[in-house]
């Protein structure tokens, strides 16, 4: 079956309304870019899930990073999107105006190099991410250890996707199937989704990032639902192996242990955080930072993240809340649902 | 932020590789994969996370360029 036939089929879908959740922010972006919603029947609803690790980072974590950035002889390094996430006292980028040293990095290896070159400065990495990014931090730490580098620290806020999906399945039983993230799955493989599919009796299908990939996955989920099937499948076979990346999984196990983690908007999810085992490079990260309830009053990130509402249903959307003046983290990140909807809204 | 971009391995040295991304050469950590020169790797945060089939990787380059625009 080619893409045209898939589209034809999805356009003419006339079964009961279906709600499919795309978990990954890059999928959300791709769905908008390629106009997939207009190619399929309105009875197939696509909703955006918890998508991006930056969007679910609690304000207390930003505050902790800001504390380092304000310290003498310290430089905080992080990925771009983190700079604009609001903390209690403004974002890292706001704080730069008040003397904070917060700079962009492209990879954790760059942090190791900078620490090696400037032993008088303490480099602090705000290490956010899902399973895709965790192994890179672990490799960087191994590199730093071998080289005897001491002026480097990791403040981690690393999270795993599967416990969040379980929570969504428990609380949102009306979601009929999941479009699973491609690059997280490169690391974790298909087994964790097989367990979810068996437990919650819903299809979980791994997708690549082209429109054709996503359409194929939607088609597969619709077909499974029609037939009453609930299987996990991998339709991103040129990148995702069934068993994931074993070396990456081993290095995650070697350096991290699981623990409860706070997801902005969702609350604390058991075993969804990865914390460095006690090594000199760890400062405790987001462990125990569970005081994050302070999303600004009207912000509905909580409902956006679990797909209960679309971003444009939030009363602040495009009014008080815009990418240049974000209220909630979902508006900040390049892969946050609110930001993507905003950039693609019809004027 | 879990985006990973495919690039072509030019050369290898220890656990590092020189990888070409449409004309830009970048040093990438290869601690998680065992690529050969000429193969494509999927790179995230300076780290190769998987080896890809050539044609598919090339096909993906366009869409990722498009997605960048949208950010
Ligand atoms: S539009 Fe802004 S205020 Fe509303 S849910 Fe999204 S981030 Fe929060």
Image (tube, rainbow, N blue to C red):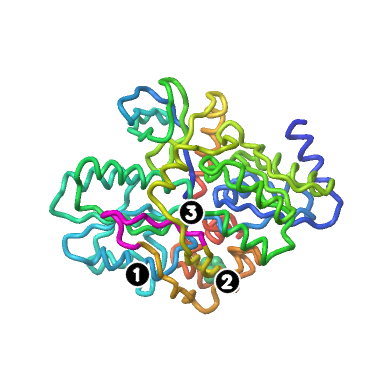
Nearer-N-terminus badge (1/3): 1
Coordinates of residue A146 in the picture (x, y in percent): 24, 40
Disc ID at residue A334: 3
Residue A338 horizontal side relative to residue A232, left or right = left
Task: Mark yes or no: residue A317 visible.
Answer: no
**Which residue, given by chain and number where applicable, does mark 2 sit on?**
A300
Circle 2: element type = loop
Which residue shows up at 17% across the image and 55% down it?
A121
Coordinates of residue A32 in the picture (x, y in percent): 62, 50
In magenta, the rendered stretch is A271-284
- Judge by depth and name the residue closer to the eye, B43 or A197: A197
Residue A316 horizontal side relative to residue A44, left or right = left
Q: Are marks 1 and 3 on the same chain?
A: yes
Count all numbered tags in the image, as a single digit: 3
Which residue shows up at 40% across the image and 57% down it?
A275
Mark 1 in CB contact with mark 3 (< 8 angstroms)? no
Is A77 above or below relative to A174? above
Tell whether position A7 is magenta: no
Q: Quadrant of the N terminus of chain A?
A: top right
How many C-alpha atoms fall within 10 Å of the one at disc 2: few (<14), some, or many (≥20)? many
Coordinates of residue A92 in the picture (x, y in percent): 33, 64
How many C-alpha atoms fall within 10 Å of the one at disc 1: few (<14), some, or many (≥20)? some
Disc ID at residue A63: 1
Nearer-N-terminus badge (3/2): 2
Q: Chain of mark 3?
A: A
For marks 1 and 3, give the CA distance.
21 Å
């Amino acid at each position: 079956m080619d893409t045209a036939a898939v589209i034809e089929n999805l356009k003419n879908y006339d079964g009961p309304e279906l709600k499919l959740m795309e978990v990954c922010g890059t999928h959300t972006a791709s769905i908008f870019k390629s106009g997939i919603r207009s190619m399929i029947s309105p009875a197939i609803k696509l909703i955006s899930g918890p998508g991006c690790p930056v969007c679910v980072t609690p304000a207390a974590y930003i505050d902790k990073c800001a504390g380092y950035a304000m310290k003498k002889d310290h430089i905080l390094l992080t990925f771009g999107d983190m700079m604009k996430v609001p903390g209690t006292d403004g974002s890292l980028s706001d704080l730069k105006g008040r003397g904070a040293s917060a700079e962009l990095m492209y990879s954790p290896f760059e942090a190791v190099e900078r620490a090696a070159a400037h032993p008088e400065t303490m480099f602090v990495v705000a290490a956010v991410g899902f399973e895709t990014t965790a192994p890179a931090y672990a490799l960087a730490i191994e590199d730093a250890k071998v080289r005897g580098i001491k002026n480097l620290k990791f403040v981690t806020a690393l999270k795993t996707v599967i416990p969040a999906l379980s929570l969504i399945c428990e609380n949102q039983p009306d979601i009929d199937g999941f479009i699973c993230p491609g690059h997280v799955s490169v690391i974790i493989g298909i087994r964790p989704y097989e367990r979810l599919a068996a437990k919650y009796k819903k299809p979980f299908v791994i997708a690549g990032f082209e429109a054709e990939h996503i359409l194929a996955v939607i088609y597969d989920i619709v077909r499974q639902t029609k037939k009453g099937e609930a299987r996990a499948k991998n339709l991103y076979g040129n990148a995702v192996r069934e068993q994931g990346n074993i070396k990456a999984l081993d290095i995650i196990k070697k350096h991290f242990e699981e623990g409860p983690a706070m997801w902005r908007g969702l609350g604390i999810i058991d075993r969804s955080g990865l914390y460095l085992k006690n090594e000199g490079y760890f400062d405790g990260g987001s462990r125990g930072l569970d005081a994050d309830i302070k999303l600004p009053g009207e912000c509905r990130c909580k409902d956006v993240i679990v797909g209960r509402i679309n971003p444009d249903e939030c009363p602040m959307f495009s009014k008080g809340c815009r990418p240049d003046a974000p209220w909630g983290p979902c508006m900040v990140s390049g892969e946050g649902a609110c930001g993507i909807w905003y950039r693609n809204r019809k004027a | 932020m879990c985006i990973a971009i495919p690039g072509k391995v030019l050369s290898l040295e220890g656990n590092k590789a020189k990888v070409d991304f449409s004309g830009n050469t970048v040093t990438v950590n290869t601690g998680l994969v065992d690529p050969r020169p000429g193969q494509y790797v999927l790179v995230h945060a300076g780290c190769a996370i998987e080896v890809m089939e050539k044609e598919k990787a090339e096909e993906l380059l366009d869409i990722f360029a498009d997605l960048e625009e949208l950010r």
